[in-house]
Amino acid sequence: MIHRPVPSPVSSSQSLFRSTRASNWGRAGGGRDRDATRARAASTRAMTGAISSASFASRRPACGALARAASTRGICVRASTSTSTSTSTSTSHAAARARLAATRRVRASSSSSSPSSSSATSPSHDAFLGHWSRDSARNQNVVDYLVAHGVGTDALKRARASYEQTWTTSESGAEGEFQVRTTSEEVGIDRTLTYSLGEFVEKYETSAIFGAEPGEVTRVASFDAATRTHTTTTTSSIGHETTTRRVREDGKEMTCERRFVSNDAEVEVDVTCVEIFVRRET
């Protein structure tokens, strides 16, 4: 038989007290631990917030500095671009001025090695130059024109006669000014007349259309290069006359149209005739 001791009441009570105190102490200790944990967490959060605030505050100047730096770089870029554009524009202007100066030098060189611009003539002017023969078979109303000027029995002969003209640039060398020599062996004509632009006076010893006695007529000449037209108006003692000469586009024919209006109030005379001159190759 095994004998087991019976616990005393005092011992049991003490054990229960110690167990209860330990349990209470554990609960109290656990609560204190939790409080300590919460306190440490709160302290950590406060410290983290303070650090974050300090970090943000310390970064703001840096951000401002970065912004100012970026702004400065932008200004520098704009300034650089503006300077580059200005330099490019200035270079373009300088190049343009250089080309203009070179062009002027070329023109000056050309002018010094060639006749002056005042003596230069246009293709329209040059179209009149050369030798021309009247094609009498194509005359229109030439007999009536001569009769209106007082030409009698010789009117038909003169209308059928051959006429030669040689056109050269006048001594002035001006555009639209010509020297014209007209000849006809059949009627004995050999006359040279300079057609200066503007008004001029032609003097004659004898004229088949203006009179047998010496005299003079007032003429006004003009030239239109755009239409290849040379016009002469003549005022004489017997009337007013307009002579219009045009060279065809191909330069092979020249049309001469004459209109005469008599001064005689008693006789209404207004007659127009046409002559065709053909270029004669030499």
Image (cartoon, rainbow, N blue to C red):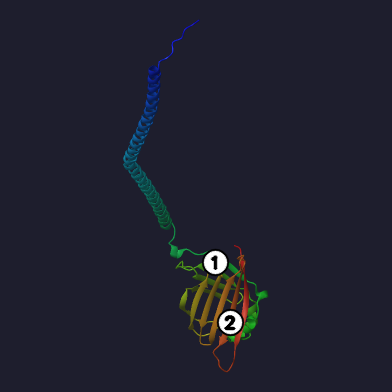
Find residue 17 and report its horizontal and vertical position in percent: 38, 22
Disc marking residue 124:
1
For disc 1, the neighbor class at 10 Å (few under 14, some 14 to 19, many from 20) is many
Amino acid at circle 2:
Arg
Q: Residue furthest top?
A: 1
Report how far apart the C-alphas of labels 1 and 2 lie in the structure.
24 Å
Query: To which residue does mark 2 refer?
Result: 259
Residue 210 seen from this side: no
Amino acid at circle 1:
Ser
The answer to which image quadrant residue 280 occupies is bottom right
Q: Residue furthest bottom?
A: 266
* Tag nearer the camera, 1 or 2: 1
- Label 2's element? strand
Disc marking residue 103:
none
Q: Nearer the viewer, residue 89 or 130?
A: 89
Query: Decide: marks 1, 2 in contact (CB < 8 A)?
Result: no
